[in-house]
Image (tube, rainbow, N blue to C red):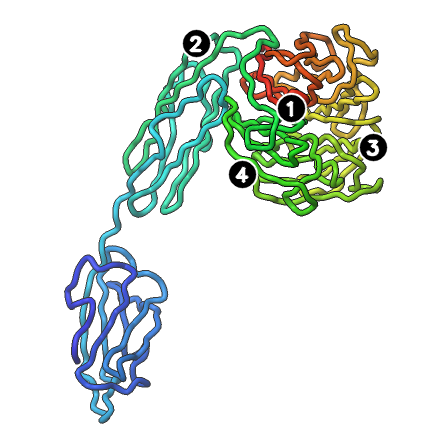
C-alpha cells in the first residue's frame, strides 16, 4: 500500500472530496471495486459511490454518489481482495478522517433602508443565508400607524434567496413624513431595515406636477404617444405609436428602457395603440396594425401573442384597447368589430359582447369594465361578463359630464373614472356611478394644456398621467384624492 487521501486521522475534510488511494505496485483493476475499496460512516453505514482505477493501476479513486455529511468520522477500508499483477494480495488497510463541521446559519439582508418617497407603493429586499444549515427567520415591525405590510413574514432558507415585498398604504393618512423599522430575527442573527414614506397634502384635481417628452425618435422622445400605464412600483410605460415601440420611465419621467420596432415579428409592432399591466408586472399591448395582442415582461421580454385579422372568436379588426382584471383576465376593445373580447392571460378565448366602436378599456378593482366608445361620445360600464351597468356621457358637447370623442379611460383604487376627452382637449373625472367630479385642460401647448389627449392612467398614489398625443409628451397631475 502506498498512500491515502485524505490522510489518516485528517480533520476538517471538505464534504465534497473524493478519496484517493495510491499503490506501491500496479494492481489488477478488476479487483478494485466497491467491495474491496469501501467507506463507512461512524455508524458503519456504507457510503455509495463509484470506484475507478487510473495511472496504469497505481491509483484508485472512490467518488461518493452524494456529498459526505458534515461533522462525521468516516472509515476507509481496502481489503485483501485487491491483488497486484503478480497476484499478490494487498495487506488490509484502514484509515479514518472527519469532515468539516457544518457552518452556523448567518443572516444577511440586501438593504438597510427603504424609501417610498411620495408615490411608491411596493419595494422589496432580499434575505440570504450566508452561513450553513437552514436559516429560520421571522419579520416584525414597530409601525404604530399601520401603513406597512410585508409578505411573507416568516420562512426558512438554505442557499437560496427569499424576496420580501413591503407595501406602503397611504390611504386615510394625514400629510406628514412617516417612518418605521422592520426587524428580521433569525437563528443566524438579526438585521433591521428602516422605512420612510411621505404623504403629501391633497392638491386639487388637475394640479400640474411635471411633463416630459419632445417630438422625435430618440429614447425619451415621442411620435404620437397613444397610451400611458403605470405599474405597482410607479414605473410608467408609454405606447409610442408612430415609433412602433414601448418606452419605460420612472415616475419622474427619467428614461429606463425601451423595446420594439416596426414589423410583424414577435416583439415588433405596427401602430400599437393602448396597453395595460397585470399584477405580476406583465405588459399587454394592443398591436392594432397587426391585429393582435402581445404580452411582455416588465423588462420587455416577449412572452406570447395572439390574434389574426378577422371577425371570429380570437380574431381582431384594428383592436385599440386592452385591459387586465385582478384575476388576470384580458379584455380587448376589438374596435372595428364593435365588440369586447375576453381571454385568459395566455390568450384563450372566454367570451365576447357588443360595444360600438370600443376604443379603450379599463378594469376596476371590483371587476367592473369601462369602455370608451369614441364615436358615440360615451363611456360604458359593464360587469366582467358583459352586462351593461350604466353609461357616462351620451351628449356630444363641452359641458361638464359631456364627452366628445373619448379615447382613453382609467380607474383609480377608489373606483373613480378618468376619461381622456380627446375632442375637448381635457380630462374628466367621474365617480363609479357616473357622477361628474372634476375636469381640467384646454387646447394648447402650455402646462396643463392638451392637443388630442388619448391615454390616461392613475398610479397608486393618486397621480394622473396623460398621453398628450399631438404635443408628443406625457403630463402628470394630481387627482385630488
Q: Alpha-carbon distance for marks 2 and 1?
A: 27 Å
Q: Which residue is mark 2?
A: 176
Find disc 4 in the rendering and name its residue.
299
- Name the foreground residue: 177 vs 150: 177
Question: Label 1: which residue?
Answer: 365
In the rendered structure, which disc, 3 or 1, sits on the residue that comes first in sequence? 3
Choose mark 3 or mark 1, whichever is in front: 3
Asked whether disc 3 touches disc 4, contact meaning CB atoms under 8 Å apart, the reply is no
Q: Earlier in the sequence, mark 3 or mark 4?
A: 4
Distance from disc 3 to disc 4, alpha carbons, whole Å, reads 31 Å
Tell me which label, 2 or 1, sits earlier in the chain: 2
Up-down: is 276 above or below 91?
above
Give how far apart the Cα atoms at labels 2 and 3 are. Answer: 49 Å
Local SS, label 1: loop
Name the residue located 24 percent from the left edge and 63 percent from the top edge.
42
Dot in front, 2 or 3: 3
Amino acid at each position: 500500500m502506498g498512500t491515502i487521501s485524505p490522510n489518516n486521522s485528517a480533520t476538517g475534510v471538505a464534504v465534497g472530496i473524493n478519496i484517493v488511494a495510491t499503490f506501491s505496485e500496479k494492481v489488477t483493476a478488476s479487483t478494485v471495486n466497491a467491495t474491496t475499496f469501501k467507506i463507512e460512516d461512524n455508524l458503519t453505514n456504507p457510503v455509495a459511490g463509484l470506484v475507478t482505477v487510473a495511472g496504469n493501476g497505481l491509483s484508485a479513486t472512490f467518488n461518493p454518489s452524494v456529498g459526505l455529511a458534515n461533522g462525521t468520522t468516516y472509515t476507509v477500508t481496502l481489503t485483501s481482495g485487491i491483488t497486484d499483477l503478480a497476484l499478490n494480495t494487498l495487506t488490509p488497510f484502514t484509515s479514518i478522517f472527519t469532515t468539516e463541521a457544518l457552518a452556523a446559519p448567518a443572516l444577511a439582508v440586501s438593504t438597510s433602508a427603504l424609501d417610498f418617497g411620495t408615490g411608491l407603493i411596493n419595494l422589496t429586499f432580499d434575505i440570504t443565508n450566508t452561513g450553513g444549515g437552514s436559516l429560520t427567520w421571522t419579520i416584525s415591525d414597530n409601525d404604530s400607524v399601520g401603513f406597512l405590510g410585508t409578505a411573507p413574514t416568516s420562512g426558512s432558507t438554505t442557499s437560496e434567496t427569499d424576496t420580501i415585498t413591503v407595501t406602503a398604504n397611504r390611504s386615510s393618512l394625514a400629510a406628514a413624513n412617516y417612518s418605521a423599522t422592520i426587524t428580521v430575527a433569525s437563528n443566524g442573527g438579526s438585521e433591521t431595515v428602516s422605512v420612510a414614506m411621505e404623504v403629501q397634502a391633497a392638491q386639487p384635481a388637475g394640479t400640474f406636477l411635471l411633463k416630459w417628452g419632445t417630438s422625435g425618435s430618440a429614447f425619451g422622445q415621442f411620435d404620437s404617444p397613444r397610451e400611458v400605464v403605470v405599474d405597482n412600483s410607479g414605473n410608467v410605460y408609454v405606447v409610442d405609436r408612430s415609433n412602433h415601440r414601448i418606452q419605460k420611465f420612472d415616475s419622474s419621467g427619467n428614461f429606463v428602457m425601451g423595446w420594439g420596432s416596426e414589423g410583424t415579428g414577435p416583439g415588433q409592432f405596427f401602430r400599437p395603440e393602448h396597453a395595460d399591466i397585470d399584477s405580476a408586472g406583465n405588459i399587454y399591448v394592443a398591436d392594432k396594425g397587426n391585429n393582435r395582442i402581445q404580452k411582455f415582461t416588465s423588462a420587455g421580454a416577449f412572452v406570447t401573442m395572439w390574434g389574426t385579422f378577422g371577425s371570429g372568436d380570437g380574431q381582431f379588426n384594428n383592436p385599440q384597447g386592452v385591459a387586465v382584471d385582478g384575476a388576470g383576465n384580458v379584455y380587448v376593445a376589438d374596435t372595428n368589430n364593435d365588440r369586447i373580447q375576453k381571454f385568459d392571460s395566455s390568450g384563450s378565448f372566454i367570451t365576447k359582447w357588443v360595444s360600438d366602436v370600443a376604443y379603450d378599456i379599463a378594469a376596476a378593482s371590483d371587476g367592473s369594465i369601462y369602455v370608451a366608445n369614441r364615436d358615440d361620445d360615451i363611456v360604458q360600464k359593464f360587469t366582467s361578463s358583459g352586462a351593461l351597468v350604466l353609461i357616462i356621457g351620451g351628449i356630444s358637447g363641452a359641458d361638464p359630464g359631456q364627452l366628445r370623442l373619448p379615447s382613453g379611460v382609467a380607474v383609480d383604487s377608489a373606483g373613480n373614472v378618468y376619461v381622456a376627452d380627446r375632442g375637448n382637449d381635457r380630462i374628466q373625472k367621474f365617480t363609479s356611478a357616473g357622477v361628474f367630479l372634476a375636469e381640467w385642460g384646454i387646447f394648447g401647448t402650455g402646462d396643463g394644456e392638451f392637443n388630442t389627449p388619448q391615454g390616461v392612467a392613475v398610479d397608486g398614489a393618486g397621480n394622473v398621467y396623460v398621453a398628450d398625443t399631438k404635443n408628443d409628451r406625457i403630463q402628470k397631475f394630481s387627482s385630488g384624492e
